[in-house]
Image (spheres, rainbow, N blue to C red):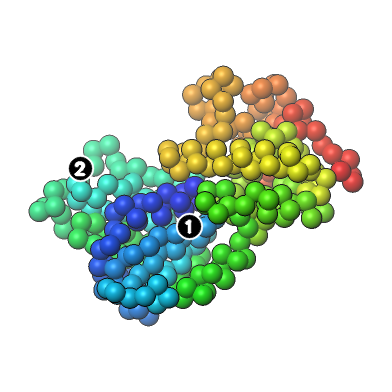
Amino acid sequence: MPEGHSIHRLALAFEELLHGERLEVTSPQGRFAAGAELLDGRRLVATDAHGKHLFLGFAQDGEETEHVRWLRVHLGLYGSWTFSGDTTFHAPHAIGAPRRRVAEEETPLPDDGQAPSPAEWTVPEPRGAVRVRLLGEHGVADLTGPTACEVVTPQEKDAVHARLGPDPLRADGDVGQFVANVRRRARPVGELLMDQSIVAGVGNIYRAEALYRARLHPRKLGRTVAAPRLREMWADLVTLMSDGVATGRIVTTEPGDRQQDEDRWYVYHREGRPCLRCGSTVAEDEMAGRRVFWCPREQRRPSATA
């Protein structure tokens, strides 16, 4: 599923493209008809992202903050936002699934795709099972295949935030909370990084790469990882994920370590291939139902109690 940087890019895209507009909200598929009716004709007044949850705030003119209705979306494995519009509507073609290869990348417009002028643009017909359509003056955003799509109150939105761990991309992301969350648990750190109540927004690529860069084996128990090391990992996640927001790509390798242009990751999906730094064969195993990757030399396997 898309990792946290993609959700923050979506929040920025909606902020730039549709903020302040009174939107026509529909559910071409029909499964979100009741929710769409609650939002239709309201203005998009706020966007927010926390981990893998996107929140879009809708309000009537002059409405107080406590009456804002929030559209909460979790893309899950198969969800995607697709954009279309005129020359003033600068957006990628799609963010979410299906992603190109295993790169978690958004899909750009085709090379020969030319957006029409505002006078020439016509609203395209929905493609596929569109759960939600947000239509503005210059463009449209279609949501397909999400795991979660619901209208929530401000109080219900707060409850979602409360159950999530700190997000390295949020201004209120708390490194102290992250360290405490990891060190109080006797579970492998590789599992903890994928637990959204421990740290929000980290997916399988950032998990594998952050552990490699910190020289931590995925099976090292969280309670045995020193606090300074976890603080360094948090700072590294902030840097890596912020770069992902800026570029729309996950790149974790240092330029001097790349042997080929496509060497974007140290261990993720490099099982059976040489480590870019030491040449050891990258290993792979299953952890909590997901594949995990590491370098046996750079990330030493701990003892049973470490």
Q: Residue furthest left?
A: 119
Secondary structure at numbered mark 2: loop
Nearer mark to the viewer, of 2 and 1: 1
Label 2 and label 1: CA atoms lie apart by 30 Å
Place of residue 123 in the rendered image (x, y in percent of width and height, measured from the top left):
20, 60
Q: Amino acid at mark 2?
A: Gln
Secondary structure at numbered mark 1: strand
Graded by Cα atoms within 10 Å as few (under 14), some (14 to 19) or many (20 or more), the crowding at tag 2 reads few
**Disc marking residue 99:** none
Q: Is residue 220 above or below residue 153?
A: above
Graded by Cα atoms within 10 Å as few (under 14), some (14 to 19) or many (20 or more), the crowding at tag 1 reads many
34 relative position to 282: left or right: left
Q: Is residue 284 above or below residue 37?
A: above
288 relative position to 77: left or right: right
In the rendered view of the protein, which quadrant contains the C terminus? top right
Residue 208 seen anywhere in this rendered image of the structure: no
Place of residue 271 in the rendered image (x, y in percent of width and height, measured from the top left):
66, 34
Quadrant for residue 130, please give it: bottom left
Give me the residue at 31% from left, 52% from top. 16
301 relative position to 277: left or right: right
Q: Amino acid at mark 1?
A: Ala
Q: Which residue is mark 2?
A: 114
**Disc marking residue 49:** 1
Residue 213 seen anywhere in this rendered image of the structure: yes
Give me the residue at 57% from left, 48% from top. 168
Place of residue 279 in the rendered image (x, y in percent of width and height, measured from the top left):
69, 21
